[in-house]
Image: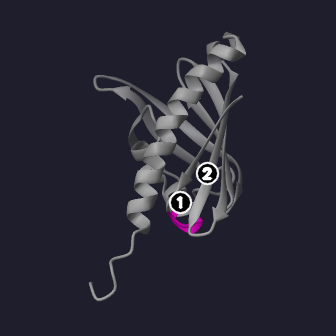
Amino acid sequence: MAINERTVHARSVDVWDVLADGWLYPLWVVGASRMREVDDHWPQVGARLHHSVGAWPLLVDDVTEVAAATPGRSLTLSAKARPTGTARVTIRLAPNGSDTRVVIEEDAVSGPARLLPRVLRDLALGWRNVETLRRLAFVAERRGARPPSGHA
């Protein structure tokens, strides 16, 4: 299982707000290119994001479903990524002062990617999730930024 972590310079509530807004998924998830629909009860268990992966004109429609959620603390997803299979992704948030330690764990659970040796899966997913966490940090830090006092 690939495990990556990053300190995000935003409160955990601000990071959770990004995770809880399904329409932002393509902004921070590497490979997701557009949203088609977000279930009204996202990010509750069973809710789905209907997204596409790839680049136009080679887009593939897929879904990501919430397997478990503890609001403000963790989100576990079952992410389909055709044609490679399905991955289980867990994102954990831990407040650290005014920052948040974000840990993402991911591994293939089905499909052709599961046939790759674990070391190769971990390398590919680890590289991808370094960028995913970087993007998540960019979005959360900017959304959570407060204007200096005296400014509207």
Task: Give the distance between the C-alpha atoms of the residues marked 2 and 1, in whole angstroms.
Answer: 9 Å
Q: How many marks?
A: 2
- The numbered mark at residue 73 is none
Provide the major secondary structure of the magenta segment.
helix
Query: Against 30, is 36 above or below?
Result: below
- Mark 2 and mark 1 lie on one chain; the one further toward the N terminus is 1
Query: Can you identify the residue that label 1 sits on?
Result: 15
- Residue at 34% x, 86% y is 149
Label 1: how many residues lie within 10 Å, few (<14), some (14-19) or many (20+)? Answer: many
Q: Which quadrant is the C terminus positioned in?
A: bottom left
Kind of residue sitting beneath label 1: Val
The residues colored magenta run 10-15
Helix, strand or loop under label 1:
helix
Q: Residue at x 40, y 64 (%)?
A: 143
Q: Are marks 2 and 1 in contact (CB under 8 Å)?
A: yes
| Residue pointed to by mark 2 | 102
In this view of the protein, can residue 25 be seen by the observer? no
| x, y percent for residue 78 | 65, 37
Residue 84 point in image, percent of width and height: 57, 18
